[in-house]
Image: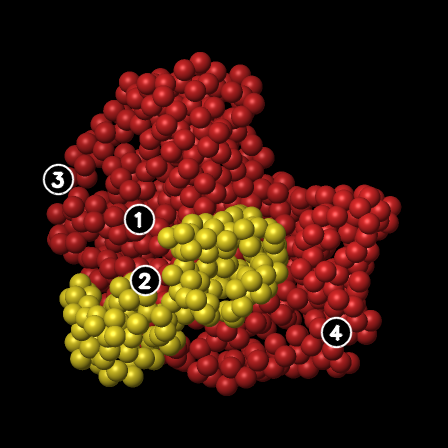
Amino acid sequence: MTTEIDRRDYRGAAERVAERYGRDRGFLIPILQDVQKEFGYVPREAMEALAELLEIPVSQCYSVATFYTSLALTPRGKHLITLCLGTVCYLKGGKQIAEVVERELGVEAGGTTEDGVFTYQPVNCLGACALAPVMVVDDVYYDKVKLSQVSEILAKYEHGEKAG
Amino acid sequence: MTLRELQARAQEKWQSLTGGEEPIIWVGLATCGLAAGAGEAVKAARAQLEEDGIAARIVPVGCAGACCFEPLMDLEKPGGPRICYGQVTEEKAREIVRSFFVGGDPRPDLALGTVGEVEVRGIPRLRDLPMLAGQVRLVTRNFGMINPEDIDHYLADGGYEALERALTEMTPEQIIEEVERSGLRGRGGGGFATARKWRSCREAEGEPKYVICNGDEGDPGAFMDRSIMEANPHAVIEGMVIGAYAIGAHQGYVYVRNEYPLAVQRLASALEQARDHGLLGENILGSGFSFDIQINRGGGAFVCGESTALMASLEGRSGEPRAKYVHTVEVGLHGKPTNLNNVETWANVPLIIARGGKWFASIGTEGSKGTKVFSLVGKVRNTGLVEVPMGMTLREIVFDIGGGIPEDKEFKAVQTGGPSGGCIPAQFLETPVDFDQLWELGSMMGSGGLIVMDEDTCMVNVARYFVEFLVKESCGKCVPCREGLAQMRAILSRICEGEGREGDVELLLELCDVLDEAALCGLGNTASNPVRSTIRYFRGEYEEHVRERHCPAHECRGLFRYEIAAEPCTGCGACRRACPEGAISGERGEAHAIDQTTCVQCGLCFEACRFDSIVKV
């Protein structure tokens, strides 16, 4: 599996993305986000290439990549579970939902399941408070989630994985 | 093209849309609507139209603010009234499309209200609904009415007239004077006088100057700025161009949270269209003034809502704030004079220029002028976006507009200002809401989240929630914030877990003082508010946790129990099946019981019971 990843063109991707933003280092965050979109995370090799292209130290790339929660330094799972833990979701049971998700998947916040199917990422607020509690899998919003629905929702993706 | 020509063309287009021969379906496609299933509803409506052989236009609009009724869909026949339907499921979409367009029956039983002045038998006007009747919609006036991805809709509604006026009839100083007359204060939380900020930046030495729109709406429970950017992005852009002209800036940035992809998309398309129309970029409207705007996505860090951290982020660095003894209006982005305002502040600017500062100042209270958009959420019936004049009382907002607390529960507090704000208890429901009053109560306006809490909400846990939030979001640069918050979290956690000690409350207050005095930025300086305000108004709850090891709101695990009341229990077994720990036993048809030694208090049985037999004690 590593050989497959190694064969990927980190530098090429870094160049493409950097050009898109005119090699402006002020756009480092969106640049890293776009790199992440390509690989599912921010690979070290891409950061090194970016540092050279933007004429900044690698440490600045690393500092930014570790500061912002939307950037990940390790590969993410096939499906991203975003659980809103904003105040309203929290008050309406979001915390209990978090516990169920963690128990079902056996991962902690920010973790990826061993089989690489799910990455679980709680976030502060998705701004859809009227629909609380809200859980998003990839781009699909699940609103007014009940504790009992969590395993159903997860199963959809697990089974899709098996069937696919 | 002149603005007049642009507008004439836009109006023609609007006329051919609304005055045409085709029926129209307007559908709210903002984040809330989409999350509630608007996408599926549109598909169903489209399928029904096809089945019935009707050619209709489907026009996407922004959020109308009535989140609790999402997905929203308006149907309009040529020359007929526009009728709004709420909670449109796929089935309901098919039903209303067929009934209204084929059968001519507007289905008053399913309708929410009519849009505008027209009345239809059996259907109230939307504006007369309790949720909307008390509102004064200025910033949100065309939410849900226009397509945010079509600049012509905004132009047809009088958009960019204020900009033209500013560029052709006013000097930069006159614009600042007009804003000063309006009394506009920053909507991002601090409430700083906008005109003063603009003037300082204009007078500051150094070139180039920058203007920034802060769309890093980080307060959990607040989504006004998201809605504005999604529903009416041109108002923000127009405000920024006017401000840039007044300040003397030629480059602007909109910094948007990473969690708001739709806002980014809508803004990007609005910027492109504004450029194509000569309303942004080189030589705007032939005035000789040039200004452009770039969008920057945030990276998911709450602290970046703080102006100096935001600017660090715009420079491609970690979002760490700096001390502000030198103001950002003098030394800001790239060390140059920078003026930063919040999304809603910018959106107010065109209104002030178009209608005058005096008019704006006639709305609101002595010290806080105009309206404020709030996101009214939590334990309240009508959740959504509400825009009210400054000075409306909390009671009017929560009970008249919000419709009160669901399930007839008791109102306990309203939380304002996000993690920088506090909880305001029932005895202050008559308080008029403005910047100064909220500050006096130990809270703050913040960006405008109003989170209603009922009797089931534990105030100690609320304080713990916000402190935990801030621990995660503290950038770690200054010691009081990094270490002080961690200590506060440890104390609050032990209180919530039944391990609280005598003297803990006093210790918390001491830590609050340290943060107030010594933290570097606004995040740390206001971090004590959630703790201090809950102690100030709900000290009894803290004491009950510490002395009696009991949570009066039945929220803190371990400080209450789930029990099955023998009387209403039918022995259906739903709770037994739901329990992941096998802690519930009982014969079918007989009252069940919970084994307290194995119960983990996950709450699944409480949710599963349909007979209210499970009680928290």
Residue B102 sits in quarter = top left
Q: Amino acid at mark 2?
A: Arg
Q: CA distance from mark 1 to mark 4?
A: 48 Å
Q: Secondary structure at mark 3?
A: loop
Q: Which residue is mark 3?
A: B1
Q: CA distance from mark 4 to mark 2?
A: 42 Å
Examine the rendered structure and indicate whether residue A152 appears above or below residue B258: above
Q: Nearer the viewer, residue A6 or A142?
A: A6
Q: Is residue B469 left or right of residue B596?
A: left
Callouts 1 and 4 close, C-beta under 8 Å:
no
Do the residues indicated by labels 4 and 2 lie within the same chain of the protein? yes
At mark 4, the secondary structure is: loop
Q: Is residue B514 visible?
A: yes
Question: Mark 3 or mark 2, which is nearer to you?
Answer: 2
Callout 4 amino acid: Gly
Assess disc 1: are there few (<14), some (14-19) or many (≥20) residues with their C-alpha within 10 Å of its C-alpha: many
Task: Say above or below: B168 vs B47.
Answer: below
The residues tagged by marks 3 and 4 sit, at their Cα atoms, a distance apart of: 70 Å
Q: Quadrant of the C terminus of chain B?
A: bottom right
Residue at 27 percent across and 59 percent down: it is B295
- Asked which quadrant contains residue B540, the reply is bottom right
Give the residue number, with chain letter if any, for mark 4: B498
The residue closer to the viewer here, B305 or B473, is: B473
